Amino acid sequence: MILPTPGTIPLEFAVIEFIPRRNHCNVDNGWCANQANQFTKPRIFRTMALRDILVYPDSRLRKRATPVETVDSAVTQLIDDMAQTMYGAPGIGLAATQVNVSKRIVVIDISEAHDQLQVFINPVICGSGERVETEEGCLSVPGIVAPVSRFSQAHVTALDRHGVPFELQTEGLLAICIQHEVDHLDGKVFVDYLSQLKRDRIRKHLVRESRPEATGVARSKENTPAL
Ligand code: NI
């Protein structure tokens, strides 16, 4: 998903526009949300690894993720890897499905300073409020921005990175972002909300870009971190 900003490139042009990547990697700040969704002190990540992000139309993005049964060291390692991958992309949200792990885990950081990581394990969301249309992009659909209609508010229950349950009433960008990421866990990609014509155009573009002879650079709209 991509943060809505003025001047978003229309879909028709997004596939041909060159957009330089931003370099704002910030992987040292491992903030964690506690039960009250307040953020703990930053800590230094353990050894982390960048994971490959699946790109649409990869069929593995269609797999429905299964719940995490035990929050063990393998899960926390995955969370750390996902956070580093998200910050490095750069993006503001990432679902485990996107790094080819079929577990219901989401990481999000919508803060300007990229220092407020939020972790959602087994998130369950309930949308409410009016429907709002927001320009979205996605780390699995690089370079594409398109309007998607979602609930303006969302109530979330989940486990934090320590396995502690919490709940959260969200609105604005965080509400949009969590809906986008939970879609990933259910095997859904934001382009599914677009017309068949637009989806076909995006699919052809990304397949073409994935070929070895393609010279295009992975794109991320300036000032619009992807989800
Ligand atoms: Ni996404």
Image (cartoon, rainbow, N blue to C red):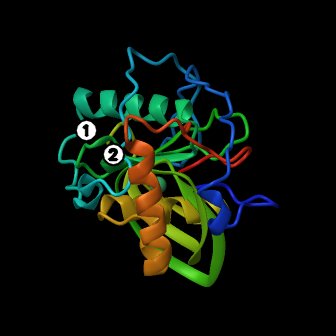
83 and 6: which is toward the camera: 6
Q: Residues within 10 Å of mark 2 (few under 14, many from 20)?
A: many
Where residue 69 sits in the image (x, y, percent)? Answer: 17, 47
Q: Is residue 156 visible?
A: no
> Vertical placement of 43 versus 37: above or below?
above
* Residue at x 25% of width, y 38% of height: 71
Where residue 86 sits in the image (x, y, percent)? Answer: 50, 37
Q: CA distance from mark 2 to mark 1?
A: 14 Å
87 and 12: which is toward the camera: 12
> Does residue 216 appear left or right of residue 126 in this picture?
right
Q: Which residue is mark 2?
A: 96
Q: As shown in the figure, which amino acid type bears the numbered disc 2?
A: Ala
Labels 2 and 1: the sequence-earlier one: 1
> Does residue 134 appear left or right of residue 30 in this picture?
right
Q: Quadrant of the N terminus?
A: bottom right
Q: Residues within 10 Å of mark 1 (few under 14, many from 20)?
A: some
Where residue 200 sits in the image (x, y, percent)? Answer: 42, 70
Report which quarter residue 15 is drawn in.
bottom right
Report which quarter residue 169 is drawn in.
bottom right
Query: For residue 71, which numbered disc appears in the image?
Result: 1
Report which quarter residue 131 is drawn in.
bottom right
The nearer-to-camera label among 2 and 1 is 2
Label 2's element?
A: helix
* Residue at x 36% of width, y 34% of height: 52
